[in-house]
Image (cartoon, rainbow, N blue to C red):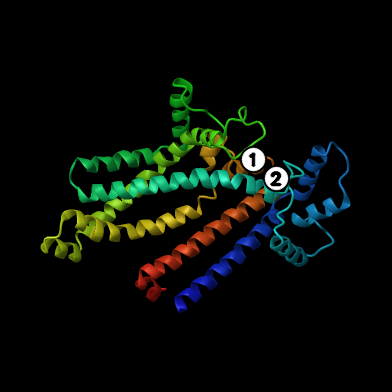
Amino acid sequence: MTFYVRRISFYIITLWAAISLNFLLPRMLPGDPAAIMLGKLRRANGGRPLSDEMVRSIRSILGSDQGMSWWDQYLAYWGRLLHGDLGVSSTRYPAPVVDLIAGALPWTVGLVGLATIISFVLGLVGGAWVGWRRGTWLDHLVPVTTFLQSIPYFWLALVLVAVFSVQLGLLPIVGGYDVFDFPAGPQLSWEFVHSVVVHGFLPALTIVISSVGGWLLGMRNMMVQTLAEDYVTTAEAKGLPPRQIRNRYAARNAAIPSLAGFGIALGFVVAGSIVTEQVFSYPGIGKLMIQSVQGLDYALMQGVFLVITLTVLVANFVMELIYGFIDPRVRHRG
């Protein structure tokens, strides 16, 4: 129980620090972020003056309200967060930041989440098999996948586009779906699902190729280490079938560290694959983050940073609890 209390307390303090940092960042930037954002909003509004309420809201969000102390602004910021108010985007005025993130989040979770799961499964199964057959020709798979992992994301993405899209014409280059077939936007139909799968194939392939090597190498090394343990030697001495030794004794124990890493990787799914989404113009969180930085959209930057931070913290917290349940030694050390 003490372990869980300490971990919960740690993550509560970390959450408070992350939200406080998100409050302080725009107030520590040089210049006046609120004035920049108000100028963008006026231009987006056709030059017409903004309402006093909108001006006060923007200045309060970005720390330029001279009538309020930092402490009052901090309390007001927490109040808006608790009500789910992350402000208004200046680059896509008058769209609320919450709506923009909610629109981009399913695309990133679907693409990066599915690609992460596929690369993890391939790496886990492949690493277990390579570790079991260590010293054979299968060991040559390790340097190949490691080399593929070292290739920069953007370069690999451009190569795949040049081959499959430009040369062969098999797959689309950009977008999350065919906007000409679905001009009204996303809709629930098999045709739309097929279009999403086709458009997401190359981005997903890029992520899988770039990440499967790490999972395979880690699982292979853990498999080799586990096969040298006494309980595996005992199982072999008892005459158990090799398949049972591999799956029940070696692979299950070797996979525990990879499972912990997989939980952390899932937490970073929400952050998206920024380079990949930018190359393929995929409508996810990564592309939204790039657009917010390019447009100096402070409210959107704050919102994206906050969502990513919260997701990573929650994923780490859940995995620590699960890992502590699986391995009692962690609870005693914690």
Q: Is residue 51 above or below residue 11?
A: above
- Viewer-side residue, 162 vs 232: 232
Helix, strand or loop for disc 1: helix
* Horizontal side of residue 103 vs 212, given as left or right: right
Question: Is disc 1 in contact with disc 2, using a CB cutoff of under 8 Å?
Answer: yes
Q: Amino acid at mark 2?
A: Asp
Residue 148: x and y in percent read 37, 38
Q: CA distance from mark 1 to mark 2?
A: 8 Å
Q: Where is mark 1, residue-wise?
A: 291
Residue 18: x and y in percent read 60, 61
- Residue drawn at (18%, 46%), measured in percent from left and top? 135
Residue 179, quarter of the rendered image? top right
* Horizontal side of residue 132 vs 171, given as left or right: left
Q: Where is mark 2, residue-wise?
A: 297
Q: Is residue 36 above or below residue 244?
A: above
Q: Amino acid at mark 1?
A: Gln
Can see residue 272? no
